[in-house]
Image: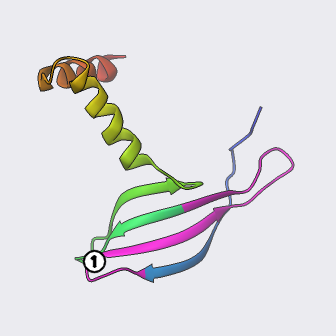
Amino acid sequence: MVDYTNPRINVVSQKKINDKYTIVNSVLEATSKRPQVKIDWRIYTKNPDRPLIRDLIVEGLSLARTQKEEFNSIIQNNEGDISALFKTLEEFLIK
């Protein structure tokens, strides 16, 4: 079992992609109970006073892309009916 309590995250670098986005590269430090994990943060920085996290890329896997693909799958499996997605999200929130 991997233990992710008491995480130590170190920022490795940052790169301004354009006026709207900055990528921050970080590492969740390894311990005797967990491996090192690379985490990249896609930050919306159009307003520098209110940066917003738009995506987390964990070991190369985009959480936003994964979520988008899951939503698309629900819609496609229900003959393109977007109300099926809304129903699934409502059920998730109730749990």
Looking at the image, which residue is at 35% across and 32% down? Answer: 70
Residue designated by label 1: 49
Residue 67, located in which quarter of the rendered image? top left
Where is residue 45? Give x, y as percent. 29, 75
Q: Quadrant of residue 19?
A: bottom left
Q: Tell me if residue 26 is in the magenta stretch.
A: yes
User: Who is closer to the viewer here, 41 or 67?
Assistant: 67
Q: Start and end of the magenta stretch? A: 16-39
Q: Residues within 10 Å of mark 1 (few under 14, many from 20)?
A: few
Q: Is residue 56 above or below residue 80?
A: below
Q: Quadrant of the C terminus?
A: top left
Q: Is residue 95 above or below residue 43?
A: above
Side (left or right) of 16 relative to 28: left
Q: Report the front residue among 70 and 35.
A: 70
Looking at the rendered structure, the secondary structure element under dot 1 is loop
Residue placed most toward the observer, 13 or 59: 59
Residue 89 horizontal/vertical position (percent): 26, 25
Residue at the farthest right position: 32
Residue shown at the point (46%, 64%) measured from the top left: 41
Left or right side of 26 for 94: left
Please provide percent x and percent y for residue 61.
51, 50
Q: Amino acid at mark 1?
A: Asp
Image mark count: 1
Residue 9 falls left or right of residue 66: right
Determine the residue positioned at 60% across, 54% down. 59
For the N terminus, give its image quadrant.
top right
x 31%, y 41%: residue: 68
**Toward the viewer: 6 or 64?**
64
